[in-house]
Image: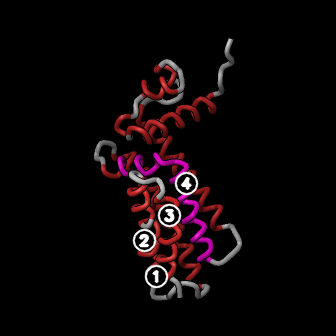
Amino acid sequence: MRSRKTTEIRREEILRAALFIVEQQGLDNLNTNAIAALIQLVPSAIYRHFKNKEEIIAALIDFIGERLQQNLQQATTQEGTALERLKSLFELHVKLLQEEPSIPRILYSLISSERNQELKKKMLAEIDAYVYETKKLLLQGKKAGEINPAVDVAAAAMMFLGMIQPLVILSQENKDVLDEYPQKLWQCYQRAIAF
């Protein structure tokens, strides 16, 4: 007889399966039947852990938010200058996209869709929190004299996040982009904001 998995382990399996499906087929093709088949469950077993597809997507957004916060925590608590911490955050962000390629698909699907405004707001709140913390790092750099005082921190924080978008788009066709270009992008960004 097989032992039953804990709710926490089963939820993790469901979310991992959902991430895989989104990566391969997009968010629109995410459904409980596909998840159940991937982890060898009957579809009704999914409903013991999540009420519906929207609840699974909300959990995926929480997962993304947690990963972004972990990256922020790691980058902002390390030794070094604000610019060094920003660079570390950028590298962690690129690494996250390499490890979890479904994240951009979830993000774009939710932001471009008008179907579920609550999920869209939830995703945007995670992005806003990330941009806010990036602004704080930029302000620290300004105070320390590392970042040009004329730099608008809100614009620089959005630009920081915006550097990632071309990598994500181009890596859909060529995975090497995520290896070849991050350092070059960072150098351009640093030259644009450094004092």
Secondary structure at numbered mark 2: helix
- Residue 121 in view (yes/no): no
In the image, is residue 105 part of the stretch drawn in magenta? yes
Identify residue for label 3: 180
| The N terminus sits in image quarter | top right
Which of marks 1 and 2 precedes in the sequence? 2
Q: Residue at x 65, y 24 (%)?
A: 5
Q: Amino acid at mark 3?
A: Glu
Q: Amino acid at mark 2?
A: Met
- Judge whether 153 appears above or below 39 on screen: below
Q: Residue at x 39, y 57 (%)?
A: 170
Identify residue for label 1: 192
Q: CA distance from mark 4 to mark 1?
A: 24 Å
Viewer-nearest of discs 2 and 4: 4
Q: Amino acid at mark 4?
A: Leu
Name the residue furthest top. 1
Q: CA distance from mark 2 to mark 3?
A: 19 Å
Q: Are marks 1 and 3 in contact (CB under 8 Å)?
A: no
Secondary structure at numbered mark 1: helix
Q: CA distance from mark 2 to mark 4?
A: 18 Å
Position in image of residue 108 (x %, y %): 36, 51
Q: How many marks?
A: 4
Crowd tier of the residue under label 1, counting other residues whose Cα lies within 10 Å: few below 14, some 14–19, many 20 or above? few
Which mark, by number, is residue 96? Answer: 4
Q: Which residues are magenta?
A: 82-110
Residue 165 sits in quarter: bottom left
Identify residue for label 2: 159
